[in-house]
Image (tube, rainbow, N blue to C red):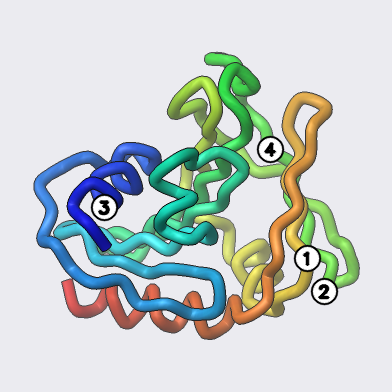
Amino acid sequence: MTARTLFAALFAAGLATSVAAAEPVHVGHWSIVELGESCVAYNRPDKEYNASPWNSLTIVAPEDGHAKLQVFFWPGHVKADTSKLLGAVRASGIERMSLDVVAISDYGVETMEQLPEAFAAQIRQGGEMTFALGGNSLIFDGTHMEAVLEALDTCRKAL
């Protein structure tokens, strides 16, 4: 991963701080990287994420273990007063959950609190993950999610 790619990933994730350059761990199409005070897992290849972080899913795991979810839509799609994101995971029987979020850019939202355990449990099951906001939905492949979350937790514990 080049320094430019890493910075772009950090900027898109809202985490452009001092960073220890580390090689990412890859699990399927996911990358997990240590950022100094947190670890992130993102679902796009580095080159794509560098060029455009839109239409992506990121899980941020700080040292305290209170993971948050970031969903990046398209530029201009997220309004400053956005407060709810509807999430669903197909493998768990399509149980929908409304997540409290805050806009972090005009294209991204982040969960306000730690990712709810009930939703984290759905994500761990894998399967298709859908996130809806303002009439648009993004669908992500949740294959390998158990391994992704294990790698993210291993990274976080090493901070």
Residue wearing tag 2: 91
- Using the image, determine if residue 3 lies above or below residue 119: above
Query: Which residue occupies 58% across, 66% down?
Result: 117
- Label 4 amino acid? Leu
Secondary structure under the numbered disc 1 in the rendered image: strand
The quadrant of the image that shows the N terminus is bottom left
Q: CA distance from mark 1 to mark 3?
A: 27 Å
Mark 1 in CB contact with mark 2 (< 8 angstroms): yes
Query: With respect to residue 122, does 40 lie above or below?
Result: above
State the residue in front, 154 or 119: 154
Residue at 62% in and 43% down: 55
17 with respect to 89 (left or right): left
- The numbered dot on residue 85 is 4
Task: Please name which of the two marks, 1 or 3, marks the residue nearer to the observer.
Answer: 3
Residue that appears at 70% across and 70% down: 122
Callout in the foreground (3, 4): 3
Q: Secondary structure at mark 4?
A: strand
- Looking at the rendered structure, the secondary structure element under dot 3 is helix
